[in-house]
Image: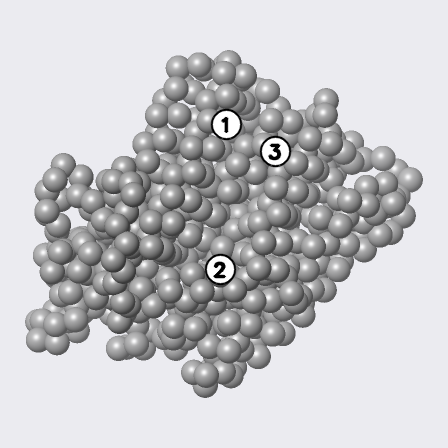
Amino acid sequence: MLQSKTYQPRMNPSLLLTLPLLLPLYGAVLCLLFWQRNQAQAVIAATVQLGLSISAGLLLYEVSQTGILTTQIGKWPAPFGITLVSDLFSALILVSASIVGIAVFLFSLQGLDSKRKKYGYYPLLLFLQMGVSGVCLTGDIFNLYVWFEVLLICCFALLALGGTKAQLEGTLKYVTINIFASGILLTGVGVVYSLYGSLNIAELALIVRQPDHPNLQLLTLCSVFFLTGFGIKSAIFPLFFWLPASYHTPPIAISAFIAGLISKIGIYTLIRLFTLVFIPKANFMLPMLLLLSALTMVIGVIGAAAQKDFRKILSFHIISQIGYMLMGLAIYTPLALAGSIYFIIHNILVKTNLFLVSGVVAQQHHTFSLKKLGGIYLKQPFLALLFLLSALALAGIPPLSGFWGKFMLAMGGFKAGNYGIVATSLCVSLVTLFSMTKIWNEVFWKAKPLKVSKPSGAIPAKSRYPKFLYMPVIFLMVFILLISLYAQPFINLAQQAANQLLYTNSYIEAVLKR
């Protein structure tokens, strides 16, 4: 049991919990009022991004000091009203999301064409961030579904923004599979309510821990709906095919944010529900999660190794890395779950940075094809260094951030006796290093081919200040090095967050006041 602290919050919990929702909402509405006025929208978006990062940082500080924060919208007591709640896990995700939001916004200033900016890029980005905040802060399953749909609608619009043939094709695949997943989730919501009479997550956590409840045996059936629905949205094996077909089609200022963050929100939701409500230790779910984790890792990294396009390699690696995040939930111990939490934060930063690096390369060399690139190490050694550090972090080379996450997961697996999944994760790390080495050799090290490529529709807009595109990459690299070289405080936060997830009394008491 976590010990409560006597520290009193300096800010109103209601304000801390609503700011991450209200700031992007009001900012997006203001951007709509300045439709097709790019400079005004950029100023509004910049102000909101800064405010969102500050509010997320304050929320993380307060939660780390006082414990779980809650508020009831409209003053209706839980479980009857709409609950907003934040623990360390959700606060860490919000801080990570705000950091990559700033980086992607900075990249868009010079790396996105004015046409897309005029027709809704900034308000859509802010609405998307509002959806992410809603998923992280909601306290009931139905609103979780609603916020996820807000998030996905924004993804649909951003993926299609610009209307190129490749974008529309990728968006159609994304929309089709996610509508199917949403139908499964909505069915699951209805089944849960019919069996247990509540959708409040804390009350459900209390109900399913009553051994004499008549519908307890049907809990596993409910969990299958949510595992399938959020598994599709997270790109877990075998329903991941839509991701590499969609994420490489839009401009980098769009794909970097979606690829770096959104799939991790699906894993966040699985971890949230399967620690509070569905209790996989009591049924066959843990072996299934272990198998899905291993297959997701292996298939994703094999797909990445076979690609010859910068963005497609990175897109397949998203699938592979999702397997690591699922691994901690499958092992279901505090150490392994802490490894998943740390790994999610690491991957949000690193994956976004790698996509931004690919955008800088494409903006200056007009292609993402490995065969058509080369010689960048000699011309742009600093960019090569930024890529190398991010790539080594993704592969888990010590002392970079990926190593610490994988080390915690491996130790958790060894202590739990799950040697097979640990061996799989280590082998996948080697293949990840191979595919990152392939990018390094083809893009940065080998001599550039004599034939000059023609720009394609997905190439970032030609910038008047190309060196400005380095700024968001450097910005993210600072945070990657921070959690790599000064890892212990972040590991401690991840361990505390895992304890809050597995020892659920603190969450239940904070929400229900019992």
Depth check: give the residue in front, 287 or 170: 287
* On-image quarter of the N terminus: bottom left
Q: Earlier in the sequence, mark 2 or mark 1?
A: 1
Depth check: give the residue in front, 81 or 70: 70
Name the front one of labels 2 and 3: 2
Determine the residue positioned at 43% across, 29% down: 48
Of helix, strand and loop, which one carries label 1?
Answer: helix
Indicate left or right for 268 with 37 as reference: left
Q: Which residue is mark 3?
A: 107
Label 2 sits on what residue type?
Phe
Label 1 sits on what residue type?
Ala
Of helix, strand and loop, which one carries label 2?
Answer: helix
Marks 1 and 3, how far apart at CA = 12 Å
Label 1 Cα crowd, 10 Å radius (few <14 / some 14-19 / many 20+): some
Determine the residue positioned at 78% across, 44% down: 382
Marks 2 and 1, how far apart at CA = 27 Å
Q: Earlier in the sequence, mark 1 or mark 3?
A: 1
Q: Earlier in the sequence, mark 2 or mark 3?
A: 3
Q: Which residue is mark 2?
A: 490
Q: Residue 70, can we see it?
A: yes
Label 3 sits on what residue type?
Phe
Position in image of residue 81 (x %, y %) = 13, 44
Q: Which residue is mark 1?
A: 46
